Amino acid sequence: MKLLKNGLLYDGTGSEPYKADILIDGDKIAKIAPAIEAEETWEVVDVEGLSVSPGFIDAHSHNDWFAIKKHPAKYFEPFIRQGISSFVAGNCGISAPGFEADTPHEDKLGAGLFGYQATTGRYPTVSSFFEA
């Protein structure tokens, strides 16, 4: 267990930030309270003077193109370091899945954007993309 003590919590609800302790169990938030008494075996991190928030959502991203590349972690690490834990993809008309496998416009797909090549893979449906 890890306990973040004395943080200024921005909880994502739009409420004013407030001072709180946050107990983390593995990769889950176990408890948020004004003051949590630490147990002897817990790792305690004093975050006094620091802001704490839930993961951010990148609402306009094309990270789906990177997910299908070899070694995709290197593309996602910069986002994770910025606190982005989720992204929305496919919401602006171009996405890795959803084009016909025999499209005559393959040379225009991505127009070189995201390093698309015919060898990247073709995913005519979203489910075929997730299965890949």
Image: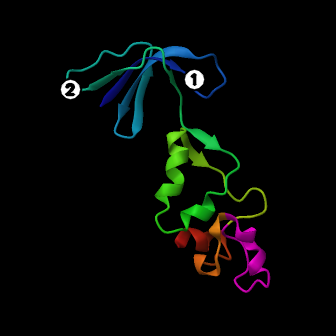
Name the residue tied to disc 2. Answer: 41
Residue toward you, 109 or 130? 109
Which residue is rendered at x = 25% and y = 26% of the image?
A: 42
**Rendered position, 4 above or below 121:** above
User: Callout 2: 10 Å neighbours few (<14), some, many (20+)?
Assistant: few
Choose the circle earlier in sequence order: 1 or 2: 1
Q: How is the image coloured?
A: rainbow
**Rendered position, 53 above or below 82:** above
Q: Secondary structure at mark 2?
A: loop
Name the residue tied to disc 1. Answer: 10
Residue toward you, 123 or 51? 51
Image x and y of residue 13, in percent: 63, 26
Which residue is rendered at x = 48% and y = 19% of the image?
A: 50
Please identify the quarter of the rendering in which residue 128 is found: bottom right
Is 130 on the left-hand or right-hand side of 3?
right
Which residue is rendered at x = 69% and y = 83% of the image?
A: 101
- Which residues fall within the magenta stretch? 96-113
Q: Secondary structure at mark 1?
A: loop
- Farthest residue in the left direction? 40
Image x and y of residue 58, in percent: 64, 45
Image x and y of residue 67, in percent: 55, 63
Image x and y of residue 80, in percent: 51, 44
Please identify the quarter of the rendering in which residue 35 is found: top left
Which residue is rendered at x = 79% and y = 80% of the image?
A: 105
**Rendered position, 64 above or below 24:** below
Amino acid at circle 2: Thr
Determine if the magenta segment contains residue 99: yes
Is 86 on the left-hand or right-hand side of 37?
right
Q: For the residues marked 1 and 2, what is the alpha-carbon distance in whole angstroms? A: 27 Å
